[in-house]
Image (tube, rainbow, N blue to C red):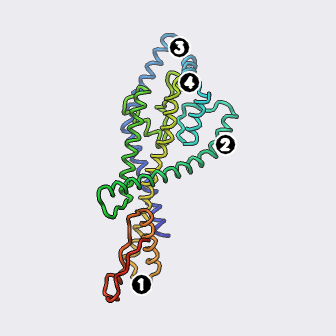
Amino acid sequence: MRQQSVRSAALVLCILSYLLAGAAVFDALESEAESGRRRLLAEKQSELRRVGFSAEDYRELQRVALQAEPHRAGRQWKFAGSFYFAITVITTIGYGHAAPGTDSGKVFCMLYALLGIPLTLVTFQSLGERLNALVRHLLLAAKRCLGLQRPRVSTENMVVAGLLVCAATLALGAAAFAYFEGWTFFHAFYYCFITLTTIGFGDFVALQRDEALQRKPPYVAFSFLYILVGLTVIGAFLNLVVLRFLAASTDAPERAARRTSPIRPGGSASVSHRIHQLEMWARDNPGFSPPASPGAVGGCGAGRPPARRKSI
């Protein structure tokens, strides 16, 4: 219990340190550019005042411009736009490019999210497990093709493979959105990353130009499919990383306890733990077989034939 409390406290300190470091870096990178944009905006306001715009006129113009921004994509609340909005709700992307305007729409949105978000998390978790199982099977097949007698797939192998699949998914989406939206490849890659990690700033949003929601059905279908498949891929990879971290953090106290505690001949707990480990390895690695028992290797029962090795 004490070790778990220390680990939790260390994680909290790591998060706080990470937040402080991130705040310092963003401050250094973005603060000066923000000041420049504010100065430019103030100059534009001064120019408008010189031609007869009052402060109230400027606020009205600003309000109209903000309200007109979402309508560049066409009708946001026809079926295609509503489906797009529903995706951003249940996946918690939340671009902010559209929001319910009626009280009944806001109430339904809350109820819809209340059921949809847990359902989506469970679905992506299940799909991610199936995807990881497929990747493990492919890695085992590849190692057998290379001539390895007893191939096995470690967690590190899975993490590397998952990283490569994620990079390929992001690059494919970046190339497609750069073509359809007219963005640079970097901005399209940034959009894909922010979307598939469900950060969803909303500074770049697909399907918001030239009434694309109504006029480009193939592109709309591709965008929806890419978001759903991409979320599955990224989620599967993040699950691998989290599980690897949890395994490393729980193995360390166990190794320390084994080093400090004496080994008792009747230590049934350590034996059962070892058997459980062997069962897990055998389930995840079909080519794995446990080592022979010491009795079979040593000289006890010299007149007997060597025992056949069994797979668990």
Circles 3 and 4: CB distance less than 8 Å? Answer: no
Which residue is label 4 attached to?
214
Discs 1/3, front: 1
Q: Amino acid at mark 2?
A: Leu
Disc number at residue 200? none
Q: Amino acid at mark 1?
A: Arg
Q: Nearer the viewer, residue 279 or 267?
A: 279
Q: Earlier in the sequence, mark 4 or mark 1?
A: 4
Horizontally, residue 109 falls left or right of residue 288, namely right
Q: Secondary structure at mark 1?
A: loop
- What x and y, as percent, mark residue 259? 36, 76
Disc 4 crowd rating (10 Å Cα; few below 14, some 14-19, many 20+) is some
Q: Nearer the viewer, residue 239 or 172?
A: 172
Instruction: Give the residue displayed 45% in from the left and 39% down from the top.
Output: 194
Q: Secondary structure at mark 2?
A: helix
- What x and y, as percent, mark residue 239? 46, 53
Q: Earlier in the sequence, mark 1 or mark 3?
A: 3
Indicate whether 246 appears above or below 311: above
Which residue is label 2 attached to?
111
Circles 2 and 4: CB distance less than 8 Å? Answer: no
Mark 3 and mark 4: Cα distance apart in space: 37 Å
Quadrant location of the C terminus? bottom left
Q: Nearer the viewer, residue 130 or 49?
A: 130
Instruction: Give the residue displayed 47% in from the left and 81% down from the top.
Output: 268
Q: Secondary structure at mark 3?
A: loop
Mark 4 and mark 1: Cα distance apart in space: 73 Å
Disc 2 crowd rating (10 Å Cα; few below 14, some 14-19, many 20+) is few
Disc number at residue 53? 3
